Image: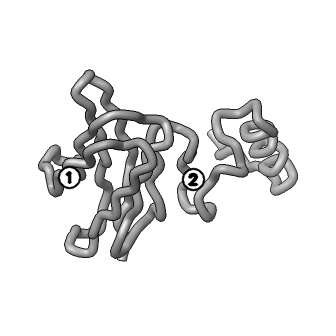
Amino acid sequence: MKPLLISAAMALSLSAAAFGGDEGPYKKGTWTSGQYAQQLDGPIGVFPNPASNEVNVVYPGLSGKATLYVIAEDGRIMQQVDVGETDGAQTILDVANLADGLYFIRVTQPDGDDVSRRLVVAK
């Protein structure tokens, strides 16, 4: 079986179809510096991503108290932060001491809400 080859024009049209206007799952206007874009109007935003020294976590879609966890791929909790009130909050995490790799940012709330985002650490 031959591999499927896609021309540049076809790839552009496919990406435009997948992310066209406000109909797709992401809105281009809310992407963070083009780095593995995460919607800032979702429950949480994580940027920059990939990160090397610090990462910002914002909570535009949450209200109330929350706890943030940085979790390694093997399930180990690497960091835990009591965020407190999420309305208008921003958490700056120091990830300089983490090894390069994939991590998960998990935000939990007392009412049972649980939101996770991937974080790539690359130095």
Residue type beneath disc 2:
Ala
Q: Residue at x 61, y 64 (%)?
A: 33
Residue type beneath disc 1:
Val
- Residue 73 visible? The answer is no
CA gap between label 1 and label 2 equals 23 Å
Q: Residue 37: give its label.
A: 2
Number of numbered markers: 2
Q: Quadrant of residue 54?
A: bottom left
Q: Quadrant of residue 14?
A: top right
Against 108, residue 28 (above or below) is below
Q: Residue at x 42, y 35 (%)?
A: 62
Q: Residue at x 14, y 50 (%)?
A: 77
Q: Is residue 115 left or right of residue 46?
A: left
- Check contact, mark 1 vs mark 2: CB within 8 A: no
Q: Quadrant of residue 59?
A: top left
Residue placed most toward the observer, 87 or 123: 87
Quadrant, the C terminus: bottom left
Element class at badge 1? strand
Residue at the farthest top position: 111
Q: Is residue 118 left or right of residue 3?
A: left
First in sequence, mark 1 or 2: give its number. Answer: 2
Task: Give the percent coordinates (x, y) of residue 89.
Answer: 40, 51
Q: Residue 63: give its label.
A: none
Residue to which mark 1 is pinned: 81
Task: Give the percent coordinates (x, y) of residue 25.
Answer: 64, 34
Element class at badge 2? loop
Display colour scheme:
one colour
Against 12, residue 109 (above or below) is above
